[in-house]
């Protein structure tokens, strides 16, 4: 009886871990700057069919004094994921719609050398298997708004160098 319970548990554990969405290890990595902030973006080379494609983003203060900016993760969706060869944005039937509130995002303060990390989510729910891309202009949500170093003026610096296109596969 004990052996049977152990086998049933192993089967249940395998079913729970084997059926969930999968994301590739490694993948794409880019580093760019927004004024005094270094931005590191990492994204998987492939995912299985799921609702979102994850992009991990870390903001690091490279200034010698504290910086303050509007929280970029307040609205962390990325729309307009396109099919790689045609450039068309899929519109699958039954796909969920996502939006963000119009609330003003809270301010985030980073001390010199401090980092702030989170995840942006590209909407890919119900997309068929295939190759997709996120154009650089669709990464605008990663941009820092109301950036202020020390007691200086608030600004929204452009990324340098500009982010590159992200290509990935849905398996």
Image: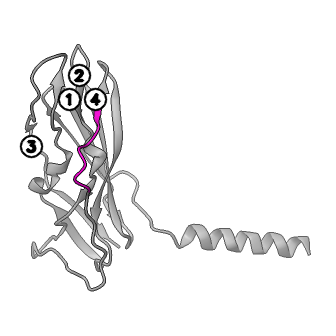
Q: Which residue is mark 1?
A: 37
Residue drawn at the location 31% of the way across and 75% of the way down: 96
Q: Which residue is mark 3?
A: 162
The residue stretch that appears in magenta = 101-108
Depicted 10 relative to depicted 56: above or below = below
Asked which quadrant contains residue 15, the reply is bottom right
User: How far apart, in angstroms, are the residues tagged by discs 3 and 4?
Assistant: 17 Å
Q: Main secondary structure of the magenta part?
A: loop
Residue drawn at the location 11% of the way across and 28% of the way down: 154
User: How far apart, in angstroms, are the residues tagged by discs 1 and 4?
Assistant: 5 Å
Give the mark, 2 or 1, whose residue is nearer the N terminus: 1
Q: What is the residue that sits farthest to the right in this orientation? A: 1
Q: Which residue is mark 2?
A: 62
Residue drawn at the location 15% of the way across and 70% of the way down: 84
Label pair 2/1, CB-CB below 8 angstroms: yes
Q: Position of residue 12 (x, y in %)?
A: 68, 73
Q: Position of residue 155 (x, y in %)?
A: 9, 31
User: How far apart, in angstroms, are the residues tagged by discs 2 and 3?
Assistant: 18 Å
Label pair 3/4, CB-CB below 8 angstroms: no
Give the mark, 1 or 3, whose residue is nearer the N terminus: 1
Q: Is residue 148 left or right of residue 114?
A: left
């Amino acid at each position: 009886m004990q052996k049977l319970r152990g086998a049933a548990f192993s089967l249940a554990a395998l079913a729970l871990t084997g059926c969930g969405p999968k994301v590739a290890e490694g993948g794409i990595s880019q580093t760019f700057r927004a004024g005094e902030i270094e931005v590191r973006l990492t994204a998987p080379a492939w995912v299985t069919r799921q609702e979102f494609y994850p992009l991990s983003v870390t903001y690091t203060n490279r200034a010698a004094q504290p910086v303050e900016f509007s929280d970029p993760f307040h609205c962390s969706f990325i729309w307009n994921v396109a099919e790689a060869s045609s450039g068309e944005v899929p519109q699958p039937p039954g796909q969920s719609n996502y939006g963000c509130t119009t609330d003003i995002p809270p301010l985030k303060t980073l001390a010199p050398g401090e980092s702030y990390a989170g995840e942006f989510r590209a909407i890919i729910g119900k997309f068929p298997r295939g190759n997709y891309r996120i154009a650089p202009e669709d990464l605008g949500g990663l941009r820092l708004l109301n950036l202020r170093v020390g007691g200086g003026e608030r600004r929204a610096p452009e990324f340098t160098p500009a982010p590159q296109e992200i290509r990935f596969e849905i398996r």
